[in-house]
């Protein structure tokens, strides 16, 4: 396996994501840590924003305190995961920050970087909340062109699995 994309959102899922990575991924040449800044919140209305509206939103947030807070969070999260991976012996780790809808940005980065595997965490949202706000890991799982590992954390449903083509393997 040459390239692995690991999408990270917060340090709270570190144990599950890194355990999955260490147990199932053998010596990738390149690990890309991706954090997606969700600029607009998390609801069905914001999921309907098109590319033009998202670009306008990104432009209007540049230089604001809100955007600076998002940038600080991204730096902190990526530094945490990078340190954990490097202390575990992973050699080449790159970081990347994107802005927008998490599932779309994860899939876009995976395509642009030509990765062989995507690892995402499960947020542990309730069924009702997933219905209202969506679930990035499920969207990535459904739409990815490469295998996807979903790290199952606290409160996560039964959908944590390895997806490859039409087959899904539950990771317990």
Image: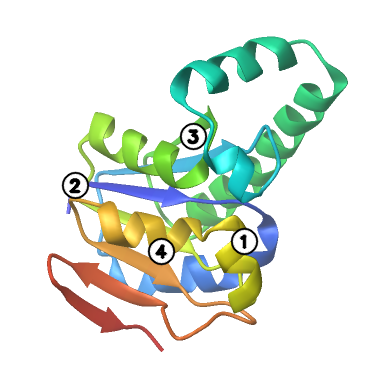
Tag shown at residue 2? 2
Sequence-wise, the earlier of marks 3 and 1 is: 3
Distance from label 2 to label 3 (Cα)?
A: 16 Å
Distance from label 2 to label 1 (Cα)?
A: 36 Å
Q: Within 10 angstroms of label 4, few (less than 14), some, or many (20 or more) residues?
A: some
Q: Within 10 angstroms of label 3, few (less than 14), some, or many (20 or more) residues?
A: some
Tag shown at residue 138? 4
Of the residues tagged 2 and 1, which is closer to the observer? 1
Residue occupied by mark 3:
95
Disc 3 on helix, strand or loop?
Answer: strand
Q: Nearer the viewer, residue 16 or 45?
A: 45
Of the residues tagged 4 and 3, which is closer to the observer? 4
Q: Mark 3 touching mark 1, by CB under 8 A?
A: no
Distance from label 3 to label 1 (Cα)?
A: 30 Å
Q: Nearer the viewer, residue 62 or 95?
A: 62
Sequence-wise, the earlier of marks 2 and 3 is: 2
Q: Residue at x 30, y 40 (%)?
A: 110
Residue 14 falls left or right of residue 76: left
Way the structure is coloured: rainbow
Tag shown at residue 132? 1
Q: Place residue 127 in its image quadrant.
A: bottom right
Vertical comparison of 157 with 122: above or below: below
Residue 158 visible somewhere in the drawing: yes
Task: Provide residue 99's location: percent of width, then percent of height.
Answer: 56, 29
Of the residues tagged 1 and 4, which is closer to the observer? 1
> Which residue sits furthest bottom?
172
Residue 92 falls left or right of residue 121: left
Distance from label 2 to label 4 (Cα)?
A: 24 Å
Tag shown at residue 37? none
């Amino acid at each position: 396996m040459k390239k692995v994309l690991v999408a990270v959102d917060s340090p709270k899922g570190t144990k599950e994501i890194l355990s999955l990575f260490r147990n199932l991924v053998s010596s990738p040449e390149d690990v890309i840590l991706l954090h997606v800044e969700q600029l607009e919140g998390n609801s069905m209305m914001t999921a309907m924003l098109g590319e033009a509206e998202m670009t306008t939103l990104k432009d209007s947030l540049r230089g604001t305190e809100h955007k600076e807070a998002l940038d600080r969070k991204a730096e902190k999260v990526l530094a945490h995961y990078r340190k954990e991976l490097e202390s575990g012996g992973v050699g080449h780790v790159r970081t990347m920050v994107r802005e927008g809808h998490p599932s779309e940005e994860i899939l876009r980065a995976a395509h642009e970087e030509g990765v062989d595997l995507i690892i995402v965490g499960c947020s542990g949202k309730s069924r009702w909340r997933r219905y209202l706000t969506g679930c990035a890991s499920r969207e990535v799982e459904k739409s990815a062109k490469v295998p996807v590992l979903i790290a199952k954390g606290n409160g996560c449903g039964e959908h944590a699995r390895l997806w490859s083509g039409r087959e899904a393997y539950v990771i317990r």
